[in-house]
Amino acid sequence: MKRILIFSLVYYPRFIGGAEVAVKEITDRLGDEFVFDMITLRKSASRFERLGAVNVYRVGFGWRASGNTFLARHKVYKYFFPFFAFFKALELHRRNHYDVMWSIMANYAGFAALFFKLIHPGVPFVLTLQEGDPIPYIKQRVGIFYPLFRRIFTKADSIQAISNYLADFAREMGARAPIVVVPNGVDTERFKYQIANSKNGEIRKNLGWSTEETVLVTASRLVEKNAVGDIIDALVFLPGSVKLLIAGTGILENSLKLQVERLKLSERVRFLGFITHDKLPEYLAASDIFVRPSRSEGMGNAFVEAMAAGLPVIATPVGGIPDFLRDGETGLFCEVGNPKSIAQKVEKLTKDKESRDYIVRNAEALVREHYDWAMIAARMRAEIFQF
């Protein structure tokens, strides 16, 4: 079997974002055909563990922390990751002779993969673009290392972008390799089963809300780009029967809670904190509308997961979102940075049942036909790992 070495700055169990879900879903389905080893940042005492179909090697100092302390240390230690990961990759390659190396995003993992490629040019380099931050911000963040950052793109032998937006980013960065758009997906059968067996009424009762009320839900990191504060502000323009569930953690959590208190919305907003990916369908099933008014987005797994759960989606026309959301057909677009626009779209979905049902049917069909993880894994095998 071919051996694939994965570079990923973070991975399960501490970090679970779209990129981490994608790696797990793909490797679980291709584990009988490939051997997957991963190098990722060490966050605990464990230097090695087997997670699903992946042998995970953790590098770095290792630390035990939580909350803001964890985030602060992570921000510092990630700068060392490219060097630790590079030397670990050299060690592992001497033993395992990898057929392909795979970088998850053109960030710190991308630098590690680039260093390895320069030493071992004969090993094919696959670059996956999962970036969600604004492109200008990404370019500004690399600072004086921008010329080296460009080489991540020019040295890649194959590039997978999860949206047309990110494919354009790769071209802009001078990519010479074939660029294939293979999106993230959703396990439609598992979602369907979990949704069907969710205890909707019980969840609402535990939250102190009735089944007659309209529940909005958002699932994301609580950071600036995901604009959760705009959803909170939108509640001011909506009746008291409209509630909001916020699933996720992040650096803005405390300020968002203060915003809720300042607007006297404590009875209408619930912060769920970190919700495991397996538990997310239960909260989607207990909700009525999914809202995420992103300021930037590479794609956004949470959108297609909400569609698979049968929720109408309100989003912004930014980044990779227009790949799957067509206004009035598979969801509704609201304006960026405009809470009143969010409220207007919520009102449309609550008052126009015919439009809502039409959107839900189309979205479910789209996800089933184009975004199932089994289909995505098959495309990765055929179009990305064909070396």
Image: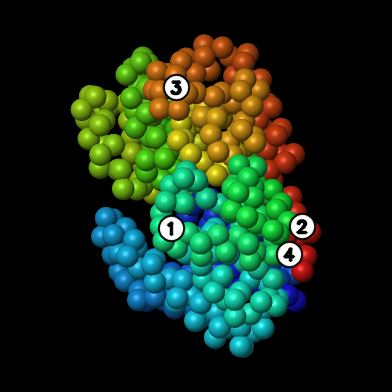
Please state, as top left, top right, bottom left or bottom right, where the C terminus lies in the image. bottom right
Q: Nearer the viewer, residue 258 or 7?
A: 7
Q: Are marks 4 and 3 in contact (CB under 8 Å)?
A: no
Q: Secondary structure at mark 4?
A: loop
Q: Residue 50: x percent and y percent?
A: 54, 73
From mark 2 to mark 3, how far is it between C-alphas?
38 Å
Q: Residue under circle 1?
A: 142
Asked if residue 3 is positioned above or below residue 158 in the image, the reply reads below
Tell me which residue sits at (72%, 41%) in the image: 370
From mark 3 to mark 1, how far is it between C-alphas?
34 Å
| Amino acid found under the numbered disc labelled 2 | Glu
Q: Residue under circle 2?
A: 383
Q: Residue under circle 3?
A: 342
Q: Residue under circle 4?
A: 385
Tell me which residue sits at (73%, 64%) in the image: 385
Q: Quadrant of residue 305?
A: top right
| Amino acid found under the numbered disc labelled 1 | Val
| Amino acid found under the numbered disc labelled 3 | Ile
Q: Nearer the viewer, residue 270 or 89?
A: 89
Is residue 114 rendered to the left or right of residue 13? Answer: right
